[in-house]
Amino acid sequence: MRGRTELPAWKALAAHRDAVADANLRDLFARDSHRGERLTAEAAGWYLDYSKNRIDDEGLRLLLALAGECKVRERIEAMWRGDKINLTEHRAALHVALRAQTGESFVVDGVDVVPEVHATLARMAEFSERVRSGEWKGHSGKPIRAVVNIGIGGSDLGPVMAYEALRHYSRRDIAFRFVSNVDGTDFYEAVRNLDPAQTLFIVCSKTFTTQETLANAHAARAWLLQSLGDEAAVTKHFVAVSTNVAEVAKFGIDPANMFGFWDWVGGRYSMDSAIGLSTMLAIGADHFRAMLDGFHAMDAHFRRTPFAQNLPVLHALLSVWNTNFLGTESVAILPYDQYLKRFPAYLQQLAMESNGKQVTFDGARVDCATSPIWWGEPGTNGQHSFYQLLHQGTRRVACDFIGFHQSLNPLGDQHTVLLANLIAQAQALAFGKTADEVRAEGTPEALVPHRVFDGNRSSNVLFAERLTPHALGALVALYEHSVFVQSVIWNIDAFDQWGVELGKQLAARIVPELQNTDAGLKHDSSTNALIRRLRPRRDGI
Ligand code: F6P
C-alpha cells in the first residue's frame, strides 16, 4: 500500500506549506477581517474557534481533500457498523454504542448490543440509588460514606477526570477516592481516615488481570477484613466492573456484584460504560444520562455533519497539519476551569495510547510522524509556569484553550479575569509583539530582543456555556473522534496498545529477581547493576 505521503492531497499540502511558509497570522487576519468569525464551527453546545491556526483557505481545502483520500467517511461508517476496525485485536471499537438512545441499534457479530448497554445502565442506576439513599448497607449495617475506585489507565483516568470535572454536581457527604498506582502510598493515602464499615470498593479492570489493580484490590480486601474480620463482608463492600467474570469470581467478588462491559469497548474509551460507576455514584443517574446525551450529541454531529463544519474532523485535520506539515511536536491542553484539572491527563492516554504508533495496519513503517505529545495544566496556573516556552521558546506547541461562559462558582469578578486571560493568551500567541512595538513602549534597546514575541503560534479555542455533564460528554466525544480521525489519516490502529507489553513482561521477570537475592542475573550490565543495587537497600529497610 502507498504511504500517506504519496497521496496527491498530502503532496499538495506539502507544496502548499512551502508556498505559504512565510504566511503569518497577522497577515491572514489582515487579509480577511471576518476570519475570526468565519473559521469557527459549533456543535453539541461547543464553539470551536480555529482561526488562530497557521492555515489559509487553500490549506483547509487540501486537508479536507486528504480526509477524502484517506477515506475518513468510510471509516466512520465502518465504526458505526461495528466492523472490527481494531484489526490487530480483531475487535470492533464501538464506544458510540455506549451512548445509544432508545430505538437505535448497533450490531456486533450479528447481535444488537444496545439492549445490553441499556440493561447495564439500568442496573448501575439502581445500584447507585441504593448506595446514595443509604439503602445499601455495609456488613455492619452502616450506610456507605466512601467510595474507592481501584483501577489504572482507562479504568482510572476517565473515572477520576469525570469525578473532578463534575464535582459541582456530586454528593458531598460521600468521599470519592481513586487508587491506581502499584506504589503502596496511593492505596495507603486513599484509605487514610476512612471507616472500613462504610467504604465501598469498586474494582475496575477490563481484563481483571492487571497487576497494579489486583495488587490494590488484594490490599483493599486485607484492609477491610482486618477491621471487619468476616469474609462475608466482601459482598457488601466490593463490586467489580469488568469483562472477565471468571477472574472476578476467582478474586472472590460475587458475579452478582459485577457490572459488565464488552471487548468492543477500549479501556481508554470506557468512561461512559460501567467503568463510570463511580461517576454515577457521585453525580446520580440523571446527571450520568445527561453526560451520555452530550456524548451522543457530538456523535451525531460527527457522523452527519459535512467535514467542513465538523468539529472533530476539523480538530483532527488541524492537528495533522500542525504535526505533519508545520513540525509541531506537542499539543498543550489548557482548560480554563479548575474542575478540568485532570482532563489533560485523561487526554494523554486517549491520544497517545491510541496514536503513539510506528507501523500502519499492514505492519509497514509509517512514512510520517504520528501522535504528537499531549500534556497540559489548567490556566491560569500554567501561565506562571510553562507559558514562557509557549510564547518565546524555540519549540512550537499547538494549544487548545478550553473555557466556559459561566462559572459554576462565581466569585467577585474572578471569572471575568479568568476568561480575559484565556482570550489574551490565544491572542498573544497568535499576534505577538514586534521589535518596533516593543521599542515604541520605550524599552531600552538591549532589552528589545528579550521582550519580542514572534507570535504566529497556533491555537484552538473551545467554549461552552457551562461545565455541565452534557458539556463534558460532548467534549470527551469531540476528542475521541478527533483522535480516531487522526489515526485514519495516519493509517494506524488507534485501538490497540502493544507498546505497553514489553515493560510489563520485563517487570514480571524482575520482581522475583529483586525478591530472591541469590538469583543469578542475565540482563545487560546496567539492568543487572540496578537490580543488585536495589536488593540490599530493600532488605535493609
Ligand atoms: O496497560 C495498558 C492498559 O491495557 C490500558 O489500555 C488500560 O486502560 C489499562 O491497561 C488497564 O487495563 P484493565 O482495565 O484491563 O485493568
Image (spheres, grey):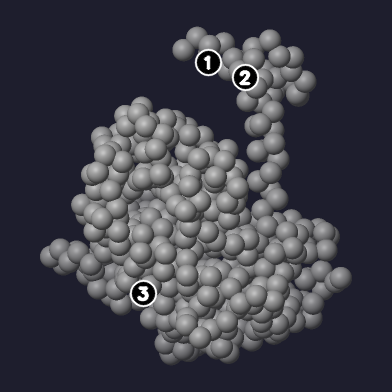
Q: In 3D space, how far apart are the residues under numbered discs 1 and 2 (Cα atoms)?
A: 8 Å
In what quadrant of the picture does the N terminus appear? bottom right
Q: CA distance from mark 3 to mark 2?
A: 49 Å
Residue 41 position within the rendered picture, expressed as x and y whole percent measured from the top left: 46, 84
For image coordinates 59% across by 45% down, the residue present is: 247
Q: Is 379 or 159 nearer to us in this picture?
A: 159
Count all numbered tags in the image, as a single digit: 3
Q: Could you tell me which residue is drawn at 37 percent across and 38 percent down?
A: 233
Please tell me which of labels 3 and 2 falls first in the chain.
Answer: 3
Inspect the image, locate mark 3, and give the three-letter code of the amino acid beneath it. Ala
Q: Is residue 195 visible?
A: yes
Determine which residue is flagged by label 2: 514
Q: Are marks 1 and 2 in contact (CB under 8 Å)?
A: yes
The kind of secondary structure element at disc 1 is helix
Question: Tag 3's secondary structure?
Answer: helix
- Name the residue beneath numbered marker 1: 538
Q: What residue did someone put label 3 on? A: 290
Q: Relative to 151, is 118 above or below?
A: below
